[in-house]
Amino acid sequence: MKKKSIIIIVFTSFLLLAGVVFYTFVQYSNPIQIDGGSWTTEGKKEIVYQFYNKGLRRITIKEVTVNHGKKPNGLALGISYGGRLVQPVTDDPDDQWGRIKFVKIDAVPVYPRLNPNEINEAIHRKDNTLIYYGIKMEYKEPIQSITVKYTYFGLPVTKKIKLESWGFWNVEN
């Protein structure tokens, strides 16, 4: 074999191995972390699961299902530009802690979590920095698990989150 052919084979093998390692990292890094939840039983029964991105890059949620593939009603991505966690409430532009807005689940990327100093700076700047995120949905039956499909580093990822350990998964109807 010629020296040039050996170099090409080694280089191609290295690129393939690097690609497999990167793909495995993206699939198993699980940057989405549930941080809590809040719900309302007045009017529409809605629940919001607060979450954050502990990853290195932004993610974009593509689909959310509950309890083994059921599509929830009223699905939305909640974003907070201030000091308040996302809750199932309406927009209040006069809220002193910042406003909460609900958008289509894939309309806004979820950026990596800010540290406490960055959060304080963003609140004081009032420059519409996205700080907190939540997944809002209507519920009629207990939600035992959520499956989130999203992109991370441009690759599709699926994460199943079991909610039994949270203590609020079986919200009374």
Image: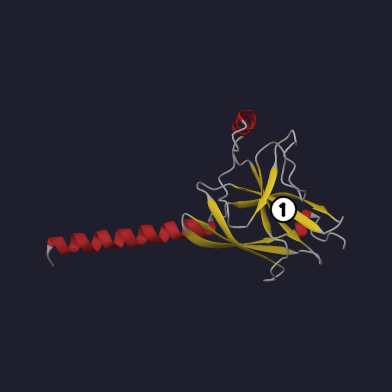
Residue in view at x 62 percent, y 32 percent: 126
| Vertical placement of residue 110 versus 105, above or below | above
Say few, some or many: other residues with alpha carbon within 10 Å of mark 1 (under 14 / 14 to 19 / 20 or more). Answer: many
Viewer-nearest residue: 102 or 113: 102
- Residue 106 image offset from top left, x and y in percent: 58, 57
Q: Residue furthest left?
A: 2
Q: Who is closer to the viewer here, 74 or 68?
A: 74
In the image, taking residue 59 as reference, residue 23 lies left or right, namely left
Q: Quadrant of residue 122?
A: top right
Residue at image coords 48%, 56%: 25
Residue at (68, 47) in percent of width and height: 101
Is 44 displayed left or right of 66 in the figure?
right
Residue 160 position, x and y percent, is 64, 63
Q: How many marks?
A: 1
Q: Position of residue 130 (x, y in %)?
A: 61, 42
- Secondary structure type for disc 1: strand
Give the residue at x 72% y 53%.
49
Residue 7 or 64: which is nearer the viewer?
64
| Image coords of residue 112 (percent x, y) | 56, 44
> Which image quarter holds the C terminus?
bottom right
| Residue tagged 1 | 49
Q: Amino acid at mark 1?
A: Tyr
Quadrant, the N terminus: bottom left
Name the residue furthest front. 93
Looking at the image, the residue that sits furthest to the bottom is 69
Q: How is the image coloured?
A: secondary structure
Q: Left or right: where does residue 17 sit relative to residue 101? A: left
